[in-house]
Amino acid sequence: MGTVDTLNQTTTQTTSTERVTGADAVVRILLEEGVDMLFGYPGGAIMPVYDSLYDYREQIHHVLARHEQGASHAAQGYARASGKVGVCLATSGPGATNLITGLADAQIDSTPLVCITGQVPSGLLGSDAFQETDVIGISMPVTKWNYQVTRAEEIPEALAKAFYLARSGRPGPVLVDITKDAQFEEFDFEYKKCTSIRSYVEKPALDLAKVEEAAELINNAKRPYVLFGQGVILAHAEKEFKAFIEKTGIPSAWTIMGLSALETDHPLNVGMLGMHGNYGPNLLTNECDILIAIGMRFDDRVTGNLSKYAKQAKVIHMEIDPAEIDKNVKTDVAVLGDAKESLQELIKRVKPNSHEEWLQRFRDCDKQEHEKVIQDELYPTSDILSMGEVIRLINENTGGDHILVTDVGQHQMVACRYSKFTQSKSNITSGGLGTMGFGLPAGLGAALGAPDRTVIAVVGDGGFQMTLQELATIYQTKAKVKVLLLNNEFLGMVRQWQQLFFDKRYSATEMINPDFQQMVKGFYIPTNKVTKREELEAAVKEFIEFDGAYFLEVMVGKENNVFPMVPSGSGVAEIRLE
Amino acid sequence: MVPLEQEFTITAYTENHVGLLHRLTIIFTKRKINIESLTTSESEMEGVHRFTIAVTETEEVIQKVVKQIEKQVEVLKAGYYKREEVVQQELALYKIPTESLTNSLEVELIVREHNARFLTIEKDFVVIEKAGYRRETVALFEDLQPYGINEFVRSGRIAVARQEYGLGKQVKELLGEEVDG
Ligand SMILES: Cc1ncc(C[n+]2csc(CCOP(=O)(O)OP(=O)(O)O)c2C)c(N)n1
């Protein structure tokens, strides 16, 4: 049967054979995989599946996004907030191509997504039929795996593999494209979940000798330093991670994807890495003697110029994906495997320690950063409102148990820098792709994926206008997402670069915006707008306390900048405080 | 110090899966690496395919590329060899006019000297076949050129490791098959 390999799977579950259509099989499989919510948009080539969904509308809630890109970002937000696989449905051609940005985003940020697209009937494949595109070809570079189904009987194995691959190992997006005739075709349905594929290594086996080596280095280190990424969250290793740093007393800094894996106020949490990260975490990267990277991939936004990155340090890299080892930074000890298992073994072998003097260095840097940047950002003395003070007020009003979803730009950097978190899986952002338009739909998905938590989507006036039609989806689904628009009437981040590196030539970055208040009212969502500091505190309080979706617009400084900054091409130690 | 580019042969044992060729070539396209030749065929194991990819690059880049190849879901095992670590061959076909044979013995001599052979002799053309290293197939091309080459084709590189077992042994172990010897 096809080329989906039967040999590769172990049976864990069997339903008795029954004759059903391919479309019906798709929906039954979604149920078997525990899907109770999916995000999508109908169209000709996926109509049979939509027709089947109608029969199961009590069990599976379909969220009708207003654009397939919105559906894929919403599914990402849902997946990141809930820890489950996000599922998207789209029709062939334009429906499928609209998903691509979300797939690329999910691929680089390791978010588990299963996308199911309809395709023209198999007899028309390759004929440039109406709404035919080579979705397999187009999505290949941005998926962990994809597969085209042309016969109904291939559906169970293809989807079983899809779910298994999306959620196992290093998670990622997968896509299954199903021709319309395969959706109509009847076959003897039987479902087995996939638990292994012979050519696929879920996670490398832990090599205890490497753990020993790492422990030895850590035990002898004078200035050890931990960098943690999303790998800690994906491996559910938050507890082990904390135990490890507490036992060894090692200062730890996060990548934007690792944010919230460790509570912000933890004494060993020294802050954010990277281009707009904190001063100490960047500067002291070039002073540590051992650099311990856990579940992060040394993205260039984190490392800056590689030839000036941590050259003095021995590097320990704990990572699930072998292809990440030595990709950007040369490793001295690579501990391959799942972060949870690796940390469990490592904790047994490290000696209790504290690195007070070394930690004090971070605190000293923090003090400098406070004086030069943070104080004025959080408590500005001018009349102009800052992004930072809005985020401070959010912290004060939520107590840190909220989920922060951000779009891309200055507001993203400010929100991530200053938000305080008390629990994991609280920060949802487009880290690797930097996708404007991510915030609003991802916020919608997060609110649906974690209905008991307060979800705040922080967006800029630029990115908001890329996917704002999803306000309609928010209204229709009653998702309790709170949208905070930090409006600087500029494509702020680009304007900042133009100011600093292009001689203030503000080419195509000024935005003459619509009346957002009127517009949001048109989507029946309660709104408020703040232009003066006196109004801010009460407005933020109401924003947080309101039970339901709410839109708050704050007019912030038009030409405020985000500092510190590691200019691109510079080394991390060349971080600028002003 | 500029890292040295050299000739590498990448080998990948894979499932036979539609689209895998595309997935593998993307890895090269993304890094703007030119594939010199690529051949794919069944391997010594039933149902397992083998890709042989020839590239000139630095070893550091090749290591990263191989990891990316091995990361693909349908790839069982991937590895790379330096030039001296493989026994490699290419196959070349040369089509020349039959009249160049009838006029003199020279072509026959050339074919014999190069250890090539006539694959077919037709009324208007003959086809000569030569297996060997790239430099050998090129040498024959140059010698035949004066007689007029109507068509010429060369296969991609195929190669096996210069050791008792290559990567295939690991693949067999992975699949839990008996490795004889
Ligand atoms: C889809 C997309 N297009 C372009 C960019 C480049 N880009 C990065 S930040 C930015 C400006 C964002 O402006 P805005 O949404 O107003 O947020 P601000 O920086 O002002 O907070 C742009 C254009 C991008 N990241 N994504």
Image: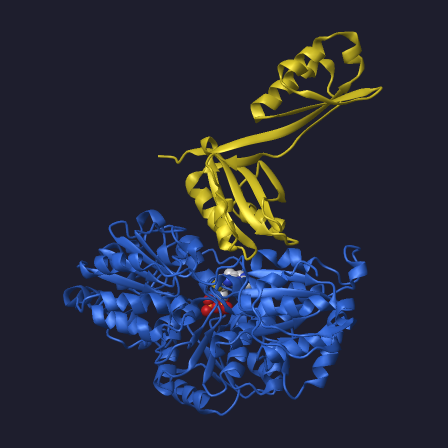
In this rendering, would A315 be left or right of A257?
Answer: left
Task: Quadrant for residue A523, please give it.
Answer: bottom right
Q: Which chain is blue?
A: A
Image quarter (top left, top right, bottom left or bottom right) of the C terminus of chain A: bottom left
Give the vertical position of B61 relative to A470 (above or below).
above
Tell me the residue at 34%/65% (across/down).
A342
Residue B18 screen position, x and y as percent:
66, 54
Residue A325, placed above or below residue A45: above
| Residue extending furthest toward the left | A357
Residue B37 location (% of width, % of height): 59, 37
User: Chain B's colour?
Assistant: yellow
Rendered position, A273 above or below A480? above
Residue A244, how many percent across, how many down? 27, 70
Between residue A106 and residue A572, name the one nearer to us: A106
Furthest residue in direction front, as rendered: B181
Is B132 positioned to the left or the right of A483 in the image?
right
Residue nearer the viewer, A1 or A435: A1
